[in-house]
Image: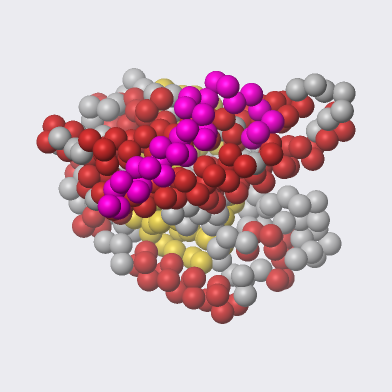
Amino acid sequence: MDRATFACSTAFFRDYNSSSQAKFTEDWGSRRNWVTWDGKPNFDHLLQKFGEAVVPVANCDVKEYNSNPKEELPFKEYIKYWKEYIKNDYRSSRGCLYLKDWHLSRAFPEQDVYTTPVYFSSDWLNEYWDAIAVDDYRFVYMGPKGSWTPFHADVFRSYSWSANICGRKKWLLYPAGQEEYLKDRHGNLPFDVTAPSLQDRSVYPRYNQSQPPVEIVQEAGEIVFIPSGWHHQVYNLEDTISINHNWVNGCNVAIMWCFLQDELAAVQREINEWKDPMDDWHLQCQLIMKSCTGIDYKEFYNFLKVIAENRISVLENGLDDEASAKNTPKAAISTLGMLHAVFDLKRTVKVLTSLSANEDFKKLDLTSLSPPPEALLHHLKAAIDTALL
């Protein structure tokens, strides 16, 4: 990315996020009930609702494989720690602990926490994982002033959105491609982009070619949107609670597919010396990739299939009133409109065509895929043609 393009991207990003107003979140149950009158976390309410839950907690003061080590703690123990941390002027022998990646909505579906903004409602990632009832990419973060998240890009190079329930965050963001200038001489990304060691050209030889990060201070109630592949580092400037989603849709699914190809190529390079003596080398590469990223090529096919079949069902059968009233994929498609469903199918066809032609995909045992890729593609194209008549 050249300087002019970077400047345009930066200006757009600032304008987009500065227009985000707290009014988009003011009706959320979490904004009404999780926050005290003076804008602080409402610990009493949170303990009443979630005290017996077990939550993932990271230690921000410890580096472990370019991340922070995590442990599971009872929520009530974490709140006790947080209160003591505040009382002790934000110091503790236990370090700075940050509750991260809590699947609260999955664990407490009956709770009135938030409503996904319509701008982010075309969410294939959570639509798929909801359908197979295995996982989701909806998270709650809670942490004291000074807690932070190291430099990273989001899972599958997805989009993400983050809404502050209370508190303030500072974001440092680098547009996709800028991270290449931040790698050390071994090709590794930094843990902390503010560390003085990045100035050492013998370790980070291209750092002086990088552009300054886009810096945003996010206020309570505001929502920040992170584009695909934008690496970022985030600080809590106050005691902060936020809702976060990772999401993919027709606009960035091709980026997800490119990411998976790059990840597989990296695995293949790492274990290339065992290619000849290993009969199932290609399968092993897929297994390793899935352990690292959370998905392999066959599951990516199933991901595309579920998204496509949901839209075909709406186009072929319409949407009844009962489905419209529910928080379902069909209801979300209805909100966005039938032309959006056609758009999604066209994007799925493009990526599925590329996946079907991929040599690594064709080397796998595809007999378990139902329907076969060729049949699914034919069905998708027919549904698009019929919808456009």
- Vertically, is 249 above or below 302? below
Residue sitting nearer the eye, 294 or 114: 294
Residue with the most extreme bottom position: 4
- Vertically, is 164 above or below 290? below
Q: Is residue 370 magenta?
A: yes
Residue shown at 26% from the left, 38% from the top: 316
x and y percentages locating residue 198 in the rendered image: 72, 61
Residue shown at 31% from the left, 67% from the top: 19
Residue shown at 62% from the left, 75% from the top: 2
Is residue 341 visible in the rendered structure shown here?
A: no
Stretch of the chain drawn in magenta: 361-389
Q: Quadrant of residue 15?
A: bottom left
Q: Quadrant of the N terminus?
A: bottom right
Residue sitting nearer the eye, 235 or 310: 310
Residue with the most extreme left position: 321
Is residue 22 visible in the rendered structure shown here?
A: yes
Residue sitting nearer the eye, 22 or 322: 322
Q: Quadrant of residue 52?
A: top left
Q: How is the image coloured?
A: secondary structure
x and y percentages locating residue 156 in the rendered image: 54, 43
Q: How many marks?
A: 0
x and y percentages locating residue 159 in the rendered image: 45, 50
- Vertically, is 311 above or below 218? above
Residue shown at 23% from the left, 55% from the top: 24
